[in-house]
Image (tube, rainbow, N blue to C red):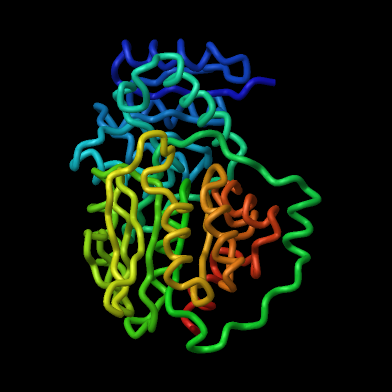
């Protein structure tokens, strides 16, 4: 049975374009179109779609309000279409805060200049989101979520997932065992990051480096929002930042973030990506650089996300003596990146999202 999709946009031209793209994939079927948020709510109840694509700015009721209402009454994976401007980033963070799980640029040229490739990205993402976990509407406190478009994820087999859960947990880390906390995540990551970081005290003893798949226009707003909510300091990383305890550094979108040691100080390098690199920023690239500086003194955490980015970097860290923690399947929006790490036998601990903050606060 094909995946049933409801398309919501006030532009008839854009609705037709999305419908044509989605219906070109035999796995998908557009079952309805809505021109505003109020229509979307009514059609979500009546049609019970598997996935909804949602515009943000619409008459009568905007996409943010509609998403919140739908997630309160009939939770469903919602894919936002967003502008990649600074204002668009803020609006998308608010919309995803309301309960949506991912977004794509509204200008398909920002996905790919090849129409067939853009269509494939859209269809693969809708297919993936239909299989993911959805949450109810967020509370009134701002909670940003916004991952960037990515290739299709890898999913763990039932046997490998059971093995990951059954694997004995690593002994509780000793205080002072680690010098750095490194976190990698993708789809659903910003909500997960907020859940983790808001539980850390201002006196948290380690610096934190974070890689979230997100474009460059989004990371400043996301870092600023986290900084407002957390007791620790959160900032978008800048080239030359010296690591400080109790500070979390978010990799800038569209760049690569590396860790270096110079003159007894550990500092971050923010560099342009090389041709052919899929993820910008990339968890593997950051983790591999960390392994050269803190091969045995890093705690690496892999949270919800599509694909397998972070697996090879975690492998390198693990080989050096560092520990790897990964999020469990039940609490992931998409069990891709954590599954890749667990399936490879790299996870020392597999935890539900709700337990990470408390466990890390004991370091």
The residue depicted at 58 percent of the width and 19 percent of the height is: 28
Residue 267 lies, in percent from the top left, at 29, 69
| Residue 45 in the image: above or below residue 210 | above
| Residue 215 in the image: above or below residue 36 | below
Is any part of residue 216 visible from this angle? yes
Is any part of residue 37 visible from this angle? no
The residue depicted at 53 percent of the width and 70 percent of the height is: 356
Q: In screen coordinates, is 337 left or right of 117?
A: right
Which residue reaches farthest bottom? Answer: 175
Residue 285 lies, in percent from the top left, at 44, 52
| Residue 7 in the image: above or below residue 341 | above
Q: In screen coordinates, is 218 left or right of 169?
A: left
The residue depicted at 61 percent of the width and 24 percent of the height is: 3
Residue 313 lies, in percent from the top left, at 52, 56
The residue depicted at 42 percent of the width and 21 percent of the height is: 118
Q: In screen coordinates, is 135 left or right of 341?
A: left
Which residue reaches farthest right? Answer: 159
Give the total of numbered labels: 0
Question: Quarter holding the N terminus?
Answer: top right
Residue 144 lies, in percent from the top left, at 35, 53
Q: Nearer the viewer, residue 18 or 49?
A: 18
Q: Nearer the viewer, residue 182 or 138?
A: 182
Would you identify the image quadrant in which residue 142 lies?
A: bottom left
| Residue 246 in the image: above or below residue 212 | below
Would you identify the image quadrant in which residue 280 lies?
A: top left
């Amino acid at each position: 049975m094909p995946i049933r999709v409801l398309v919501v946009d006030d532009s008839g031209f854009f609705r037709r374009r999305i419908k044509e793209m989605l219906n070109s994939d035999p796995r998908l079927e557009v079952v309805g179109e809505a021109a505003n948020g109020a229509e979307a709510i009514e059609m979500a109840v009546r049609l019970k779609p598997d996935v909804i694509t949602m515009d943000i700015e619409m008459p009568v009721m905007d996409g943010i309000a509609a998403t919140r209402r739908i997630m309160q009454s009939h939770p469903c994976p919602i894919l936002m279409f967003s502008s990649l401007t600074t204002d668009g980033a803020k609006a998308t963070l608010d919309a995803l805060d309301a309960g949506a799980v991912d977004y794509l640029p509204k200008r398909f040229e920002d996905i790919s200049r090849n129409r067939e490739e853009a269509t494939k990205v859209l269809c693969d993402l809708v297919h993936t989101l239909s299989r993911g976990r959805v949450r109810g509407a967020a509370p009134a406190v701002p909670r940003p979520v916004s991952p960037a478009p990515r290739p299709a994820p890898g999913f763990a087999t039932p046997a490998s997932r059971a093995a990951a859960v059954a694997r004995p947990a690593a002994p509780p880390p000793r205080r002072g065992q680690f010098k750095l906390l490194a976190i990698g995540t993708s789809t659903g990551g910003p909500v997960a990051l907020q859940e983790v970081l808001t539980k850390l005290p201002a006196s948290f003893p380690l610096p934190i480096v974070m890689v979230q798949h997100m474009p460059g226009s989004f990371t400043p707003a996301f870092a600023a929002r986290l900084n407002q909510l957390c007791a620790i300091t959160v900032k978008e990383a800048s080239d030359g930042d010296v690591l400080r305890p109790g500070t979390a550094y978010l990799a800038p979108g569209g760049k690569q973030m590396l860790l270096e040691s110079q003159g007894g100080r550990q500092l971050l390098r923010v560099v342009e990506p090389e041709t052919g690199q899929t993820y910008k920023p990339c968890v593997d690239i950051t983790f591999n650089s960390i392994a050269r500086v803190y091969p045995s003194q890093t705690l690496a955490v892999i949270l919800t996300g599509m694909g397998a980015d972070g697996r090879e970097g975690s492998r390198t860290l693990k080989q050096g003596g560092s520990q790897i923690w990964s999020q469990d399947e039940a609490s992931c929006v998409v069990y891709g990146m954590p599954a890749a790490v667990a399936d490879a036998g790299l996870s020392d601990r597999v935890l539900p999202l709700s337990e990470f903050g408390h466990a890390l606060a004991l370091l």
